Each structure stands twice: as structure tokens, then as C-alpha cells.
């Protein structure tokens, strides 16, 4: 069999971010900073987001990640980091699908 096999894209968010930066893309990284109660991902979990919406990693799942991607896009456009908090006491929690009884704090920043 002839031909070449393209390498698989990195599954590690930081390796993906580095690769995207090397290709000249804008990139943001989201990191779980704190959790209280039930949380789908532990502290330190990361999600890398490229300017075209490509993602590697996870900070929560479901609609929370949609809100995190929106924040990543804002961070890439403005250069300003943002801290997001979702939880059952927060009126945004139900809107983004976090009804599991926990709270999660996520830091989002553009990287260069």
C-alpha cells in the first residue's frame, strides 16, 4: 500500500493550541479553576478553541461549553481574559444545562 497517512490531530488541548498558534491561528484556552458539588470535569481541565471554532479538550460538556466557546471568541477578539461561573444558584445555569447541583468556575484567555 502506498501513500502517506496524515498525523492525527493532537488530543491534548495545549498541544493543539501550540500547533494552531504555529499555523498562525488565534487561540484561546479555557481552564476549570474551581468546582463545588457535582462537576463533570475536575479542576485543571482544559479546552482549546481556535478562531474558526475548532475545539480540543473539555471543561464541562453540554451547553456550558457553548458559553465557554463564546467567551473564547470574545477573548480572542479583545485580548481580555474572562472568568465564567455557572451553577444552580446562577440564573444562567439552567440556560446552559448545568442542573446537576454543582458550580464550576472557568478562566478563559487568548494565548499568543
Image (cartoon, rainbow, N blue to C red):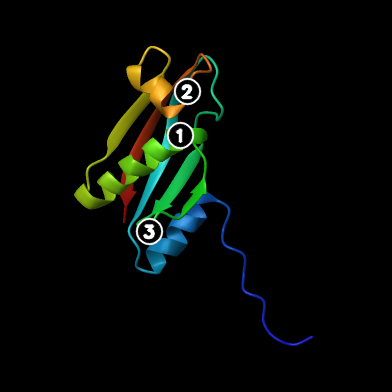
Secondary structure type for disc 2: loop
Q: Which residue is drawn at the image coordinates 34% and 29% (left, top)?
A: 84
Of badges 3 and 1, the one in the foreground is 1
Residue furthest to the front: 95
Where does the image place residue 76, in percent across and percent down from the top left?
27, 51
Q: Which residue is drawn at the image coordinates 38% and 43% (left, top)?
A: 69
Residue that numbered label 2 is attached to: 98
Q: For residue 64, what is the image quadrant?
A: top left
Identify the mark nearer the N-term, 3 or 2. Answer: 3
Q: Is residue 89 above or below residue 3?
A: above
Residue that numbered label 1 is attached to: 63
Does residue 4 appear in this view?
A: yes
Q: Is residue 24 above or below residue 28?
A: below
Q: Quadrant of the C terminus?
A: bottom left
CB within 8 Å, label 1 to label 2: yes
Where does the image place residue 85, in percent across and percent down from the top left?
36, 24
Q: Nearer the viewer, residue 75 or 22?
A: 75
Q: Quadrant of the N terminus?
A: bottom right
Please tell me how many numbered marks the rendered image carries.
Answer: 3
Does residue 60 appear in this view?
A: no
CB within 8 Å, label 3 to label 2: no
Q: Which mark is residue 52?
A: 3
Q: Which mark is residue 73?
A: none
Identify the mark nearer the N-term, 1 or 2. Answer: 1
Marks 3/1: CA–CA distance: 18 Å
Q: Which residue is drawn at the image coordinates 44% and 59% (left, top)?
A: 18
Amino acid at each position: 500500500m502506498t501513500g502517506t497517512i496524515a498525523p492525527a490531530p493532537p488530543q491534548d488541548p495545549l498541544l493543539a493550541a501550540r500547533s494552531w498558534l504555529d499555523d498562525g491561528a488565534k487561540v484561546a484556552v479555557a481552564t476549570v479553576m474551581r468546582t463545588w458539588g457535582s462537576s463533570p470535569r475536575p479542576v485543571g481541565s482544559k479546552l482549546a478553541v481556535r478562531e474558526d471554532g475548532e475545539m480540543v479538550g473539555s471543561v464541562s460538556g453540554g451547553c456550558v461549553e457553548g458559553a465557554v466557546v463564546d467567551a473564547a471568541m470574545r477573548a480572542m477578539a479583545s485580548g481580555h481574559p474572562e472568568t465564567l461561573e455557572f451553577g444552580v444558584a446562577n440564573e444562567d445555569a439552567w440556560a446552559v444545562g448545568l442542573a446537576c447541583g454543582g458550580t464550576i468556575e472557568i478562566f478563559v484567555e487568548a494565548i499568543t
